[in-house]
Image (cartoon, grey):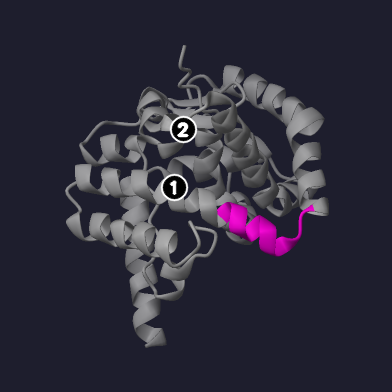
Amino acid sequence: MKSNSNPSTALWRRTGLSAALAAGLLLAGCASTQATHPQDPYEGYNRAMTSFNDSVDKAVLKPAATAYQTVTPQPVRTGVTNFFGNLGDLWSMVNHALQGNGEKAYNHMVRFTTNTVLGIGGLLDIATEMRVERDKQDFGLTLASWGVKPGPYLVLPFLGPSTVRDTVALPADWWGHPMDRMHPVSHRNSLLGLRLVDARANLLNATDTLDAAALDRYTLMRDFYLKQRDPASRQHNDDNAGRVESYDD
């Protein structure tokens, strides 16, 4: 029987947070308080599940990612990250189309075609060098663009931060990712494992920074996740990026 379980999808979402976690999350978190968040009515459960996930991460995933980072040369790791990012561009293209964003859907088609043909199957990110930028999308963000509210914040076992909306969207993300159609299943599962370890390796510096800070890590992760999954915040960040690029020109 074909399995649609793809636990690396939620972590893939989190890798989109990693750079900003190290650079800006700690500063933003200094203003956080312990007051109950209106979007987090299940905070007791969520904190307990966060502790469970952290224990699993420390026992299994982080050591595997650390070993992978240690023994694998940086150019190889970059190629692996690019390869999986290239596959993800296809699903981003579909979601941009579902959101009615034809220009970005076209850009991601160009990204995938360019990197697949000129980038040795996606190992090289030629499209970014050509300034065809990536804007990762998934079905949770597509539902948001259709007006579906996020619902309460949830921490899923093994997968981490989510919301009711994003949790409902996960099966579509699993089904829509190109790796779901890869056969034999043993090859697909091996790639899923590599994708998971590579994604965790890309988060090592960010999570080490958080672990070293005397702050409420749970609150920081929750607030940052909710902000990144809010279409209005994402649009605001895109607008600011556009203004910065115009100054660079």
Q: Give x and y (percent) for residue 114.
A: 38, 65
Can you see residue 145? yes
C-alpha separation, residue under disc 2 versus residue under disc 1: 12 Å
Q: Give x and y (percent) for residue 172.
A: 35, 28
Q: Name the one closer to the observer, 100 or 74.
A: 74
Q: For the point 79% across and 33% down, which residue is it? A: 58
The amino acid type, in three-letter code, at marker 1 is: Leu
Viewed as shown, does residue 107 lie left or right of 54?
left
Instruction: Pick out the residue farthest to the front.
Output: 184
Residue 75 forms part of the magenta stretch: yes
Q: For the point 24% across and 59% down, which residue is it? A: 106
- Secondary-structure class at tag 1: helix
Q: For the point 34% across and 82% down, which residue is it? A: 246
Q: Is residue 125 above or below residue 162?
A: below
The amino acid type, in three-letter code, at marker 2 is: Met
Magenta segment: 72-81
- Secondary-structure class at tag 2: loop
Q: Residues within 10 Å of mark 2 (few under 14, many from 20)?
A: few
Mark closer to the chain start, 2 or 1: 1
| Image depth: mark 2 or mark 1 in front | 2
Q: Give x and y (percent) for residue 33.
A: 59, 40
Find residue 199 and report its image quarter: top right
Viewed as shown, does residue 103 lie left or right of 12?
left
Question: Pointer 1: what residue?
Answer: 87
Can you see residue 34? no
**In the picture, which quadrant includes the C terminus?**
bottom left
Find residue 138 and report its image quarter: top left
Find residue 77 and report its image quarter: bottom right
Q: Name the one closer to the observer, 151 or 104.
A: 104
Q: In the drawing, what numbered circle is on residue 182?
A: 2
Q: Main secondary structure of the magenta part?
A: helix
Q: Give x and y (percent) for residue 241.
A: 39, 69
